[in-house]
Image: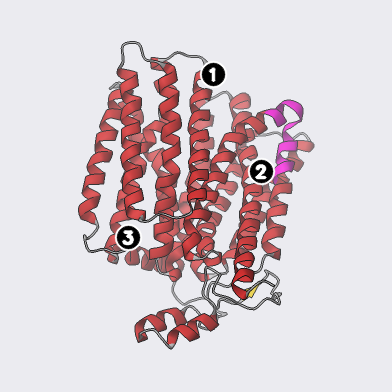
Amino acid sequence: MQSDTQKGALRWKGVSAAFLGGQAISTLGSGLVQFAIIWFVALSANSGTSMMIITLASFIPQLVVAPFAGVWADRYDRRWIIIIADSAIALVTLALMIFYVFGYDIVWMIYVTAAVRSLGGGIQSPANKALIPQITPKKDLVRINGIYSTIENVILLLSPILGGALLTLFPLWIVFLVDVVTAAIAVAIMIALPIPHQRTGKVVTALGIEPKLKHGSAWGFPSLEDAQIASQVMDDDAAEGLLADHLPDIASAPPESVMTQFRMGFLYVKKNHIIRNLMIIYALFMILISPVATLMPLYIRRHFGTQAWQISATQTAIFTGMAIGGLIVSLKGRFKSHLKTIRWAGLLVSIGTLGLALVGLMETPKFVFFVALAFSLGMVVPFYTTAVTTFFQERVDRSYHGRVFALLYMIGSAAIPLGAIVFGPLADVFPIAWLLVFTSIAQLIILLASVKAIPKDFIE
């Protein structure tokens, strides 16, 4: 017979597997639609202005809604936030599909759909990141975050391939239908999953059905029973903090406004020097790595040629490397030190960026070296992002998870557009290879500064 510990382990693993599987299905559908939307605008409008509009429609709404989303993820049931956001995205896609079936293929509808989908994604992402430590034991966070990273990167790799195949074989509305179906599957899984409530720790489905299995410490979220037992052996402050997670849920919304609560989250980060410094380092690092993403097609054109397969091969190498890197992280399961992993991964990213620059500075650059470096750089990225995510999941107070991950989401979403604004015009003045030399050196300086930004006596 299985022990209670074994049953608890099977319970959280089953819930995590179902959650990740549902999100993978939903994300794949979203990736297909995103590819289809860009493809439609490019062919129908054939305008740089139209591509700018679709890019802004896909990025700006999620940045605007992120502060609210972080507060909602801390105030309300995260599972229902994910369900509502996914359902809203599916409904607007369903509406667009119906319009297309009846022959209304107007470009502005695509813009509106992209904006609504961006809003939904901006609401859903902080809730997703905050839910993972709620259902995952602390010792397994690296593994689950690694799997989550692998799923995202595999989908980035597969979306253009599958999207292109679907658009070749079927009309555009079929791609929209696929997204609606995948979202429905993900929502059904979320409704049926037994998940500990973020305030009470009570394990129920979305409909309030409580499974017969008793609570156990195998969950990421400690049960009320665990908190009561711990209060007998902990010091008063620690026991009070653990029991605070299990105070009765308040039906009415907190009196503070959304923006007030978001500012509280911002102040929480500001006052916690380690979290604040790491977030600043993360923001600067993301901006400095953005030229690799935004200027890659232009870099290839200037140094290697104008053939489309070269851009495709480079992007495939990066995404394949990211998928493999995420898989390695998930198999590894744990980092001895998240901070050391962040620093080593950051060092390898800066070296990889410098390598890409040096290949471009060669008199006769070899494209095969460039692709190999792109693949290697992609492999390192999941180590960096997973270590950052897990560090915040473990170090940030649970009541601030939503708001802190909203800040991280805003940083990640803003990095590429901001990088494009800063480095795009510079690419018309300076060789891109030298811009990459500059960003790689700046990354190294930030890494050296990060040593002083974290106190020497800090213990993970």
- Work out how far the residue at label 2 is from the one at label 1, CA to CA, in angstroms: 25 Å
From the image, state whether disc 2 or disc 3 is nearer to you: 3
Q: Name the residue under label 2.
A: 29
Q: Report crowding for label 2: few under 14, some 14 to 19, many 20 or more residues within 10 A (C-alpha).
A: many
- The quarter of the picture where the C terminus appears is bottom left
Measuring from the top left, give residue 192's x and y in whole percent. 71, 65
Q: Is residue 223 visible?
A: yes
Question: Which residue corresponds to the image point at 33% horizontal and 54% vertical from the top-left?
Answer: 339
Residue 289 lies in the magenta-colored region: no
Q: Name the residue under label 3.
A: 275
Q: Are marks 1 and 3 in contact (CB under 8 Å)?
A: no
* 182 versus 423 height, above or below: below
Closer to us: 373 or 169: 373
What secondary structure is the stretch in magenta mostly built from?
Answer: helix
Q: Report crowding for label 1: few under 14, some 14 to 19, many 20 or more residues within 10 A (C-alpha).
A: few
- Work out how far the residue at label 2 is from the one at label 3, CA to CA, in angstroms: 34 Å
* Quadrant position of residue 458: bottom left
Measuring from the top left, give residue 204's x and y in whole percent. 66, 73
Residue type, mark 1 in image: Trp
Which range of residues does the magenta coloring cover? Answer: 165-179
Measuring from the top left, give residue 376's x and y in whole percent. 42, 32
First in sequence: mark 2 or mark 3? 2
Q: Report crowding for label 3: few under 14, some 14 to 19, many 20 or more residues within 10 A (C-alpha).
A: some
Could you say which disc has been placed on residue 309 in the image? Answer: 1
Residue type, mark 3 in image: Ile
- Work out how far the residue at label 1 is from the one at label 3, CA to CA, in angstroms: 42 Å
